[in-house]
Image: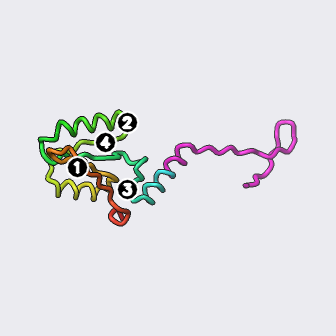
Amino acid sequence: MILLQAYTDDGNHKQQPIMIHRAIFGSIERFFGILIENCAGAFPLWLAPVQCRIMPVTDAVLDYAQDVVAQMREAGIRVQLDSGKAIDLFVSYCSCNRLQSTLTLLPHAEVALLRCPSTAQLA
């Protein structure tokens, strides 16, 4: 607590001033700055701008991938469809951009494999 000196009011009485401090935007900006610094960009799944990225291996499963994207968006999951990249480029992109989960769709079986990088991979 900071003690401030007294002042004399209009009635010649000594009053102690009260200081009200409110820094809504500064506090929020400081909070997010610390959060980004501590997470090093690898946000927890609930806070990540993109929670899941979907990659169809071939164009044969592209329609199925679009259906999966639609269902995930209806469920409130922030998802992006990423087609047209080679698998090695896709995995490299996901690990470099610290994505928490990727979904790779395989042809013929419509099987989805979930890949979640470990904490060591994100550091």
Closer to the eye: label 1 or 3: 1
Callout 4: 10 Å neighbours few (<14), some, many (20+)? many
Where is mark 3, residue-wise?
41
Callout 1: 10 Å neighbours few (<14), some, many (20+)? many
Q: Are marks 1 and 2 in contact (CB under 8 Å)?
A: no
Distance (Cα) linking label 2 and label 4: 10 Å
Closer to the eye: label 2 or 4: 2
Where is mark 4, residue-wise?
79
* Residue segment shown in magenta: 1-30
Q: Residue furthest left?
A: 59
Q: Is residue 19 magenta?
A: yes
**SS state under label 2:** loop
Main SS of residues in magenta = loop
Distance (Cα) linking label 3 and label 4: 18 Å
Identified at 42% across, 58% down, the residue is: 39
Distance (Cα) linking label 1 and label 2: 19 Å
Distance (Cα) linking label 1 and label 4: 13 Å
Which picture quadrant has residue 37?
bottom left
